[in-house]
Image (cartoon, rainbow, N blue to C red):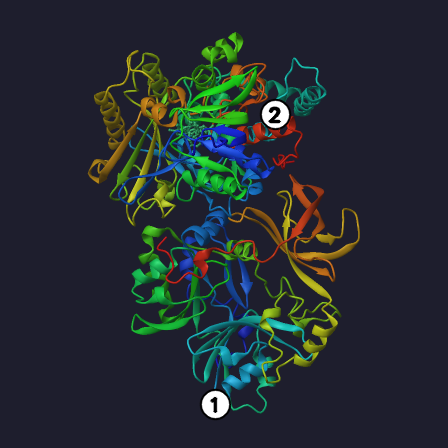
């Protein structure tokens, strides 16, 4: 386990660097970085707008190496995953990826993430937050082993309409046959790269998983094959716009992970996150949080996750949600952005039940700054049915060439 | 149609499926009206069109970049759902005769260094220039989605609108008010002289003051033309320009999608010959096939000359309107080349690997040369040393050309509507094309070897295909005498024509040319007001 063997002087270590660090640094003119699980990663390298449009118009490369990754294997691997996750894991075949959440005993979401079934008795679990302890506690009685492989696998998220075309040019034959949520291993530079058709942009895209030693070569191969296609390395800011536009949740931003939440009422259940479809109460086995979730289903959740189409062009960052102009506070906005492709002023947030039915109107009070002076404005917002942006190419197999 | 069957009558017929006609029709259909758009060409879009004229290349055949399009309209008509995506592009440069260049960079630090490289004192001037232009944009943008008031009217609404204008002017304060008034009347050269010392920087900035106009950089009025090109935005970034993915036709196609979503119809290959009028009220149109279609209202997307001198009986239009239409200034001054390239042309002046190539590039490095190019036009010739605004959308938009190949759009200033008073001949069109290609080739030695196909468009082609009189890209000059309540002529700036039920919605009306959709939307608002129907046209969202 790479987390062991740390020197006594580890506090002098400073920031960790991913295998893609030097390549990103070379492209950087903005000097805006942040720390993600101890690694330094860029918010933006050159220009947020152009980085965003690489996601929606050509191809974007985003370093997701800092994600927490765990390998779970053993004869009971399936049963274990089924115990941990809310979804019915017997449905996830080898070579498939599933998006899921996992809960504590109160049915509150600890984190969301993707589960890769790499072989009959082996899974890779990827999450935003660290999960080692959750895994350990749940492993009791299962014949499995689990490893923190976070630092052992380098990963890139490769997203945009041209990504399939470019991967084909790199030489990944058959990549165009990968359906959404498929995963497959490909030979590359004397090693293998695992490619999954997954991502966090609501668009056509892939995630590439490789050992750190060969990671640089993979980066170079993408840029070489994509040189006629305007491939761009991007930072987290551009991705953030795309994920909000696609209406996707982010742990630590839209909801507070249950394991680190102190205040009552601040953690959220899958129902309250609008993730009902991930919960299979009747999958035939007990899973974490099941009892609480059955109760909640009968009683009804406390909050409703809403995707809002806000009038006007001022983003509703951190705004309160009201039942009417100047009325009662019924919720808050957790993420907001102007969506450049959907051409909507979008906000994700939570309202108290029973507010926020699809199609209903709520109000937000928006604060915004112009030349250092703060202004505020009331704006109507309509609760949307589903994501703001959902292009056909996301699911099309094979994807169109452009 | 079987004999005796009653021909369908429409609530509204819109003549011309240019982007303004489509916008107008879409808002009317959204309000529940039964709308038909009739278009003479086999394709829709007018000057906002994508055409596949050579193998796998797509040309943005006339207009090629997008910025002026009103975001409120984009959103209200749900054009994203109908396939429109506008992508900002980066950079741009002007090439100099001595083998250098000046680049435009989005990043302010790099931009400052680039100006410093050419003229250190102009660095701060550039910031001042940008601040001032932003001020004028902020002033003018809220007027785009409003109907101009009639200053001679005492109607409540006109007085109210005049008050709105007056308040905006007063808000500017005395110093800015002075500068602003000047802005409308001075030349782009004089305007830039107030800021910059470097002739190259001035030339680099002056291009947008001459595009599409029959004015030179030293002609009074050209400063406003520059502002007209600055006042747009992409996603709130004022002054930014972008590509419509799939070419400018994507704008028109999305508008058509919105129109059809609301039940509107489009008929192509249906040119209108006449607007029919009875007892001072519109009754419909006659197509060039002889077919008559009746409607209670008719909206013309054509320019003022074509509408009033071409489609209306002078008896219906009346002497005053006929005279005003005859005097309407609509001088063709631009040409365009659409070129299919086998690769990326080299520009030895640019550093290797420079991203600037993804932006628009210009030839002509001094105001003097620009003015000489204009002199040729005045004499009825195309410029020997033309100004070009060239661009390869395919470097950004992968749908425009096969991999590694490119679509080069070359907008040319100046190109006369007639050559020394006579109609263009095919040989002259070819010679014009050669002049432009030779101009480019002076700066890009391998360009000619890369050319696969060229489409050459002089005002003759633009007029005959798009129906823009003299090929004037704005449907009429953008000079103060033809702006705001003077557009197209005083007394007719509120989109209503001289007879009952007749309206105008093209770029010949306020706020003028460019792929903006504002004229079409404003006209729809007026029509709905006359019909006492609920308004479907959005208001300006404001910049604060
Ligand atoms: C070469 C060129 C380059 C340009 N570049 C840009 C640019 O990059 N960016 C930008 O914003 N603007 C640009 N413009 C300007 C912009 O394209 C126009 O101002 C705008 O498209 C005009 O739109 P419209 O709807 O008002 O009229 P039009 O587009 O002129 O539409 C009029 C329509 O009416 C049809 N019609 C004509 N006669 C008849 C008839 N008798 N019966 C039926 N139908 C008829 C025509 O076929 C046409 O479809 C450019 C224009 C040109 C010509």
How many numbered marks have been drawn onto this rendered protein structure? 2
The x and y percentages for residue A47 are: 48, 48
Spot the residue most to the front.
Answer: B4
Judge from the rendering whether residue B398 lies leftward or rightward of residue B439; answer left or right.
Answer: right
For image coordinates 47% across by 90% down, the residue present is: A75
Residue B491 is situated, as x and y percent measured from the top left of the image, at 59, 14
Q: Position of residue B336 (x, y in %)?
A: 33, 29
Q: Is residue B25 above or below residue B387?
A: below
Residue B197 visible in image: no
Q: Kindly identify which residue carries mark 1.
A: A75
Side of B267 where B148 appears, left or right? right
B63 vs B447, left or right, is: right
Mark 2: secondary structure: loop
Tell us which disc is closer to us: 1 or 2. Answer: 2
- Locate ligand 1 by image quadrant: top left
Viewer-proximal residue among A61 and B24:
B24
Quarter where residue A273 is shown: bottom right
**Residue at 68 percent of width and 54 percent of height:** A318
Q: CA distance from mark 1 to mark 2?
A: 74 Å
Residue A289 lies left or right of residue B459; in this view the side is: right
Say whether residue B376 is visible: yes
Q: Which mark is residue A401?
A: none
| The disc label shown at residue B147, or none | 2
Q: Are marks 1 and 2 in contact (CB under 8 Å)?
A: no
| Residue B521: quarter of image | top right
Q: Chain of mark 1?
A: A
């Amino acid at each position: 386990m790479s987390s062991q063997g740390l020197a006594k002087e580890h506090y002098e270590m400073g920031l960790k660097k991913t295998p893609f660090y030097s390549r990103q640094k070379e492209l950087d003119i903005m000097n805006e970085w942040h720390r993600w699980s101890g690694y330094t990663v860029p918010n933006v390298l050159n220009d947020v707008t152009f980085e965003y449009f690489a996601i929606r118009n050509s191809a974007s490369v985003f370093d997701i190496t800092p994600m927490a990754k765990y390998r779970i294997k053993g004869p009971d691997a399936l049963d274990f995953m089924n115990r941990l996750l809310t979804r019915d894991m017997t449905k996830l075949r080898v070579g498939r990826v599933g998006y899921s959440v996992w809960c504590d005993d109160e049915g509150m979401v600890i984190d969301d993430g993707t589960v890769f079934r790499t072989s009959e008795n082996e899974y890779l679990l990827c999450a935003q937050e660290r999960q080692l302890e959750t895994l350990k506690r749940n492993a009791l009685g299962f014949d499995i082993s689990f490893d923190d492989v976070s630092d052992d696998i380098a990963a890139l998220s490769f997203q945009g309409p041209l990504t399939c075309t470019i991967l084909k040019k790199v030489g990944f034959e058959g990549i165009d046959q990968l359906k959404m949520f498929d995963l497959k291993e490909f030979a590359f530079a004397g090693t293998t790269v695992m490619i999954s058709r997954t991502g966090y942009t609501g668009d056509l895209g892939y995630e590439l998983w490789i050992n750190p030693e060969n990671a640089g070569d993979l980066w170079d191969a993408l840029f070489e094959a994509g040189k006629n296609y305007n491939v761009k390395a991007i930072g987290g800011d551009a991705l953030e716009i795309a994920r909000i536009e696609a209406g996707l949740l982010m742990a630590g931003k839209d909801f507070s992970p249950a394991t680190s939440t102190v205040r009552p009422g601040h953690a959220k259940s899958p129902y309250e996150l609008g993730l009902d479809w991930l919960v299979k109460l009747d999958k035939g086995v007990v899973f974490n949080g099941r009892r609480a979730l059955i109760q909640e289903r009968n009683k009804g959740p406390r909050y409703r996750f809403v995707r809002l189409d806000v009038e006007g062009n001022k983003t509703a960052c951190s705004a309160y949600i009201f039942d009417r102009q100047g009325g009662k506070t019924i919720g808050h906005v957790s993420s907001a952005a102007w969506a450049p492709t959907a051409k909507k002023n979008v906000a994700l947030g939570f309202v108290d039940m029973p507010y926020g039915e699809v199609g209903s109107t709520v109000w937000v009070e928006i604060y915004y700054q112009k030349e250092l002076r703060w202004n505020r404005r009331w704006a109507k917002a309509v609760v949307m049915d589903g994501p703001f942006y959902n292009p056909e190419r996301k699911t099309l197999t094979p994807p169109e060439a452009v | 149609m079987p004999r005796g069957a009653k021909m369908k009558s429409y609530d509204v017929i819109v003549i011309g499926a240019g982007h303004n006609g489509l916008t107008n029709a879409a808002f009317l259909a959204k309000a529940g009206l039964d709308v038909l758009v009739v278009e003479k060409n086999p394709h829709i879009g007018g000057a906002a069109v994508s055409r596949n004229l050579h193998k796998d290349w797509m040309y943005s055949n006339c207009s090629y970049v997008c910025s002026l399009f009103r975001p409120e309209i984009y959103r209200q008509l749900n054009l994203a759902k109908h396939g429109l995506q506008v992508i900002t592009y980066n950079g741009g440069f002007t090439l100099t005769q001595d083998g250098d260049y000046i680049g435009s960079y989005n990043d302010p630090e790099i931009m400052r260094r680039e100006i410093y490289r050419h003229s250190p004192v102009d660095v701060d001037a550039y910031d001042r220039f940008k601040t001032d232009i932003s001020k004028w944009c902020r002033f003018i943008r809220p007027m785009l989605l409003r109907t101009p008031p009639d200053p001679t009217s005492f109607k409540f609404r006109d007085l109210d609108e005049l008050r709105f204008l007056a308040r905006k002017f007063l808000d500017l304060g005395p110093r800015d008010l002075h500068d602003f008034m000047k802005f409308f009347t001075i030349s782009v050269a004089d305007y830039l002289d107030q800021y910059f010392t470097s002739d190259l920087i001035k030339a680099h900035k002056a291009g947008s003051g001459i595009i599409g106009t029959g004015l030179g950089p030293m002609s009074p009025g050209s400063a406003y033309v520059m502002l007209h090109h600055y006042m747009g935005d992409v996603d709130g970034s004022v002054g930014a320009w972008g590509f419509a993915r799939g070419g400018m036709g994507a704008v028109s196609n999305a508008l058509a999608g919105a129109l059809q979503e609301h039940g509107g119809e489009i008929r192509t290959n249906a040119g209108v010959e006449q607007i029919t009028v009875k007892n001072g009220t519109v009754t419909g149109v006659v197509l060039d096939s002889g077919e008559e279609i009746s409607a209670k209202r008719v909206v013309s997307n054509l320019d003022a000359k074509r509408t009033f001198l071409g489609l209306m009986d002078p008896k219906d239009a009346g002497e005053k309107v006929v005279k005003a239409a005859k005097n309407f200034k609509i001088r063709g001054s631009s040409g365009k080349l659409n070129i299919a390239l086998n690769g990326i042309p080299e520009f030895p002046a640019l550093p290797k690997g420079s991203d600037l190539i993804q932006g628009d590039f210009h030839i002509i490095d001094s105001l003097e040369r620009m003015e000489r190019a204009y002199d040729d036009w005045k004499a009825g010739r195309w410029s020997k040393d033309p100004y070009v605004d060239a661009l390869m959308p395919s470097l950004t938009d992968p749908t425009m050309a096969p991999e590694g190949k490119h679509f080069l759009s070359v907008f040319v200033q100046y190109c006369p509507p007639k050559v020394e008073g006579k109609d263009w001949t095919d040989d002259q069109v070819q010679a014009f094309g050669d002049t432009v290609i030779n101009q480019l080739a002076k700066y890009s030695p391998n360009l000619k070897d890369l050319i696969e196909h060229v489409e050459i468009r002089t005002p003759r082609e633009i007029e005959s295909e798009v129906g823009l009189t003299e090929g004037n890209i704005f449907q009429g000059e953008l000079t103060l005498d033809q702006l705001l309540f003077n557009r197209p002529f005083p007394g007719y700036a509120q989109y209503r024509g001289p007879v009952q039920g007749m309206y105008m919605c093209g770029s010949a009306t306020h706020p003028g040319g460019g792929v903006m959709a504002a004229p079409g939307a404003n006209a729809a608002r007026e029509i709905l007001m006359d019909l006492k129907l609920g308004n479907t046209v959005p208001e300006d969202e404001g910049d604060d």
